[in-house]
Amino acid sequence: MGDTAPVDDWETDYDIFDDRYVVDPVPVWRDVRSGECPIAHSDRWGGSWLPTKYADVQALAKMVPQLSSRDVLVVPLPEAVLRDPNFQKYGANSPPISADPPEHSWTRRLLLPHFSPKAVEAHRQYTQDLCDRLIDGFIADGKADAAGDYAQQIPPRVIAHMLGIDEDRVDEFTYWVRCVLEFGLTKPELRVQFRDVIRNFFRETVAERAERLAEHPDADDLISALLNSVDPDGNPIDHEIVVGMCNLQLVAGIDTTWSSIGSAIWHFGTSPDDRRRLAGDPDLFPTAIEESLRFYSPVTMARLVTETVDINGVTFEPGDKVLMNFPGANHDPEVFENPDEFVIDRERNRHIAFGSGIHRCAGSNLARMEMDVALRTWMRRLPEFEVSAPDEVTWAGGQVRGPRYLPVSFPT
């Protein structure tokens, strides 16, 4: 399935786990996009297609149910998992992201009110206090790992706060998520092992929360809110669906956002002119954050082809995997002027870092709020920082890309 042989032709044999792609995929997208076919193919990791043009990715995002979301990771799961009755019933069990209509539609509607701009703002002060507390922990040292000490600490705690689960266990939660989306991405057995760890944790949590609701029906955490909701037939929601929705918050809500925060810090720590402009002009934060999302888009989702699809001279057959290359689309010169240049005050920025179509990220408002607070706090308190050892920075790649070790230094 996997292949560690060097890539000679990115159009016909790409590897999203190749070190060159992980460190800097932009040249690959540029070469494929300008080649004979802007949709690359590879037999590695079970086989998949990789579109590189904005228009193609947008069109593919609208192809439902021809492209199914029941398995959003590119490396296939073991056959034993695919045959499991629970998997056949619930898919990857992270609705709505892993669900197709009609389940996708009603589970998404349940989540959206909790991630509206107004609902998200209720968590801003918690996030602000958290960011200040994290910086308090290392500011006297004059150095830090901006990924491990800061970016990776924020989303797990915010999500735990929203779900009403133990925030002191965030290191565990983080490890579980990395075993699913990073370490286990090319090792399906490890991915399945920790998928079950997360699901079993939430099975216990959901059962306990359901019992507690009998005595405290007005609890306002997200799990309680979901348990107090009903399905389209007016029945209490299947607890396994709630477990899956909690799984989504933990897995999708943590790695993606910490990758975005870390990538932004990487950029400003290696681009002193942009850092000085942002530190000196807080009005730039909105466009700077959107440009960071565009330039360093962290997420590439997979879709499973269920019907024959013809697009841009290529035919996808049932059983094929297609990578929804949102990051590559955000570097398409037909849509973005100077797409491979970070423009801190870019005005026209129709990026699709949060996806497109019915599966566009339901938590985008939360992610933007976390990025806004994290970056404003960092720049307010550490305006003269720099990445101290760029060659030592490590990146996670594959389907979620972001820095995992990011050494920075700053005046004390």
Image (spheres, rainbow, N blue to C red):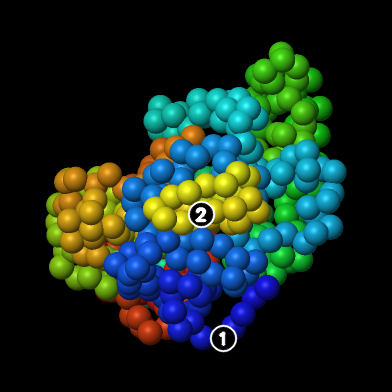
**Distance CA(mark 1)–CA(mark 2):** 27 Å
Residue depicted at 41% across the width and 38% down the height: 365
Assess disc 1: are there few (<14), some (14-19) or many (≥20) residues with their C-alpha within 10 Å of its C-alpha: few
Residue depicted at 77% across the width and 32% down the height: 239
In the displayed structure image, the side of residue 203 where residue 361 appears, left or right = left
Closest to the camera, between mark 1 and mark 2, is 2
| 238 shown above or below 92 | above
- Tell me the quarter of the image containing the C terminus: bottom left
- Residue on which the image places disc 1: 5
The dot on residue 155 is: none
In the image, 252 versus 300, the foreground residue is 300
Q: Position of residue 218 (x, y in %)?
A: 65, 19
Q: Secondary structure at mark 2?
A: strand
Q: Position of residue 33 (x, y in %)?
A: 33, 64
- Tell me the quarter of the image containing the N terminus: bottom right
Residue depicted at 17% across the width and 46% down the height: 347
Residue depicted at 57% across the width and 47% down the height: 308
Assess disc 2: are there few (<14), some (14-19) or many (≥20) residues with their C-alpha within 10 Å of its C-alpha: few
| 314 shown above or below 244 | below
Q: What is the residue that sits farthest to the top in this orientation?
A: 234
Q: Secondary structure at mark 1?
A: loop
